[in-house]
Amino acid sequence: MVKDFNQKTHSSSTRGKTRKSSLSQRQAKGSGENLKQRKFLYYFPFVLVVFLGIAQIYLSNSLATWGRQLNQLEQEIVQREEDNREFKSEIASLGCLTELTDAAQKKGFVENPPILNLSSKIPVALKTP
């Protein structure tokens, strides 16, 4: 009977050891996974901050470039508007000149005909010594 008791206690202690060892294996496995999760949760905010910082720099650069392009376009628009004003004033002045010419012709004024010189004499001012 004592022998049976020793065998039972010996077998139960080996079973307990196997239970403990399998439990410790599961805990070790779980703690490895838990450690990976902790590392991920530890490094994730830093990686996120770095990524968002790079994104902010890129977007700031893009906005600055777009701002410069917009400024150039606005300057071009102002220049075109000034050119248009000048052209309109030229057209208006040409219109006035044609009106003056028409009014002068109605009153009997004529344009001077070109002077045609038929003599072969050279004027004194053009002679060289």
Image: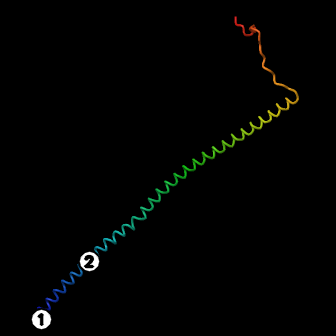
Cα distance in 3D space between marks 2 and 1: 34 Å
Residue depicted at x 31% and y 73% = 31
Would residue 65 appear left or right of 78 to someone viewing this image?
Answer: left
Question: Compared to 55, does 31 lie above or below?
Answer: below
Front-most of residues 108 and 80: 108
Q: Position of residue 103 (x, y in %)?
A: 85, 32
The amino acid type of the residue labelled 1 equals: Met
Q: Which residue is mark 1?
A: 1
User: Which residue appears farthest toward the right when viewing the image?
Assistant: 107
Residue 123 occupies which quadrant of the picture? top right
Question: Compared to 100, does 41 lie above or below?
Answer: below
| Neighbours of disc 2 within 10 Å: few (<14), some (14-19), many (20+) | few
Residue depicted at x 81% and y 24% = 111
Q: Position of residue 76 (x, y in %)?
A: 63, 43
Would residue 85 appear left or right of 26 to someone viewing this image?
Answer: right
Cβ–Cβ under 8 Å for marks 2 and 1: no
Residue depicted at x 72% and y 41% = 85
Label 1 sits on a secondary structure element that is: loop
Would residue 78 appear left or right of 25 to someone viewing this image?
Answer: right
Question: Compared to 34, does 116 lie above or below?
Answer: above
Q: Which residue is mark 2?
A: 24
